[in-house]
Image (cartoon, rainbow, N blue to C red):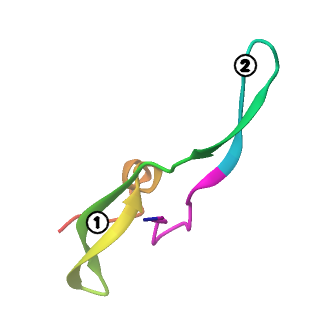
């Protein structure tokens, strides 16, 4: 299940694992997204928020 941040839109990015012999394998970098209760337009709602938005104060927890 791919989750994205409801505030900034950060989500899963794709990239490659590179071994010492330089063989490349596809991988995914998942965003650190948490499901929290926050105030949205004055009412508490459950939203998906990345930790960067939580730390910066863009979200007020309920």
Q: CA distance from mark 1 to mark 2?
A: 42 Å
Is 26 on the left-hand or right-hand side of 61? right
* Badge 2 element: loop
The quarter of the picture where residue 8 lies is bottom right
Q: Residues within 10 Å of mark 1 (few under 14, many from 20)?
A: few
Q: Is residue 55 magenta?
A: no
Coordinates of residue 23 in the picture (x, y in percent): 79, 25
* Residue occupying the point 57% across, 56% down: 12
Residue visible at 38% across and 56% down in the picture: 57
**Magenta stretch prevailing secondary structure:** loop
| Label 1 vs 2, first from the N-terminus | 2
Between 29 and 18, which is closer to the camera in this rendering?
18
Q: Which residues are magenta?
A: 2-13
Instruction: Specify few, some or many for label 2: CA neighbours under 10 Å numbering under 14, 14-19, or 20 or more.
Output: few
Mark 1 or mark 2: which is in front?
Answer: 2
11 or 59: nearer the viewer: 11
Quarter holding residue 25: top right
Q: Quadrant of the C terminus?
A: bottom left
Q: Which residue is mark 1?
A: 60
Looking at the picture, how far across and down is residue 18, in whole percent?
Answer: 74, 25
Q: Secondary structure at mark 1?
A: loop
In the depicted structure, whether residue 25 falls above or below residue 11? above
Residue 4 is inside the magenta segment: yes
Indicate which disc residue 46 carries: none
Q: Position of residue 37 (x, y in %)?
A: 21, 69
The residue that disc 2 covers is 19
Outermost right residue = 22
Q: Residue at x 23, y 64 (%)?
A: 61
Nearest the camera: 45 or 11?
Answer: 11
What residue do we see at 42% from left, 65% from top? 1
């Amino acid at each position: 299940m791919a989750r994205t941040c409801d505030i900034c839109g950060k989500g899963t990015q794709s990239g490659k694992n590179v071994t010492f012999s330089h063989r490349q394998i596809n991988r995914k970098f998942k965003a650190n997204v948490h499901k929290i209760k926050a105030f949205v337009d004055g009412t508490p709602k459950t939203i998906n928020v990345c930790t960067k938005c939580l730390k910066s104060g863009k979200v007020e927890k309920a």
